[in-house]
Image (cartoon, helix red, strand yellow):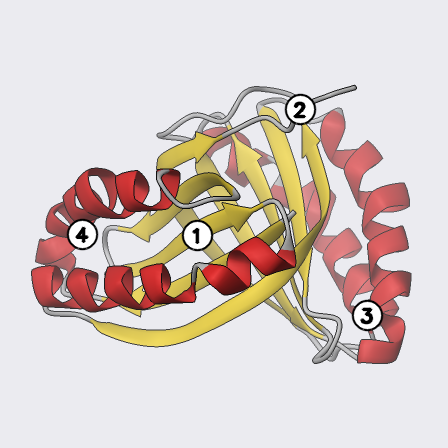
Amino acid sequence: MYVRATRVQIPPDSIEKGIAFFKETVAPMANSTPGNMGQVLLVDRESGKGVGITIWDTPQAMGASEQMGITSRTGSIAATGGQIINVDRMEQVINERAAPPQAGASVRLNTIAGDPAKTENAIKFVKNQVVPALKSQKGFQALIMNVDRLTGRSTVSTVWATRADLEASESSVSGLRRDAADAAGAKDVTVEIFESAVANIKQPATA
């Protein structure tokens, strides 16, 4: 699958407006667009940071939906008085779930600016080392890894039932985070904590 992730900065007192706009406008618009596999909204209520994510079954579907994305971004900024920080378009290479997607979960978003030549290295490390270590942690719900093979940029999101579960897992993941940065050819990993305000994800069809 493929994702388009739009990072926004809005006034903290407009967070609820942003969530409402995403639920009432962005999600229905995405659902009616061919190839859409879901929508996720991550928010930090204190800082006003947000990441709106649409998920697509093919890169062609994501590309064909660009006008929908522009319309959504323009409307979101008008509704909240915020600003667009950047837009990432990535391939989803790992989606490991221990529980169904649900709003209200806590998310640790790790962003890595790596070496494009080491992208496969990073994917293998996360799949073989990070996923098994996290699956045994209390409250673990999911690990999702997205990559931009051209730039080497990647994100690893770990999803937890509660903020307490997320915080309790930190001692187990801090060392893995450094090793993941090494595997990706990156100097460091940027870590942010979000609430999953919207988590509408369709399950791919199985044979």
Give the crowd class for mark 2: few <14, some 14-19, many >=20 residues within 10 Å: few
Q: In the rendering, at what x and y percent does residue 193 appear?
A: 44, 51
Which residue is pictured at 65% across the width and 47% down the height?
Answer: 1
Q: Quadrant of residue 137?
A: top right
- Write down the residue under mark 2: 205
Q: Determine the secondary structure under disc 3.
A: helix
Q: Quadrant of residue 31?
A: top left
**Mark 2 vs mark 1, CA separation in Å:** 21 Å
The one of 160 and 164 positioned closer to us in this rendering:
160
**Mark 1 vs mark 3, CA separation in Å:** 23 Å
Label at residue 53: 1
Which residue is pictured at 63% across the width and 59% down the height?
Answer: 59
The reply to whether the C-beta atoms of the residues labelled 2 and 1 are less than 8 Å apart is no
Left or right for 153, reference 122: left
The reply to whether the C-beta atoms of the residues labelled 4 and 2 are less than 8 Å apart is no
Label at residue 184: 3
Residue type at mark 3 is: Ala
Which residue is pictured at 35% across the width and 76% down the height?
Answer: 85
- Write down the residue under mark 4: 18
Q: Determine the secondary structure under disc 2.
A: loop
**Mark 4 vs mark 2, CA separation in Å:** 31 Å
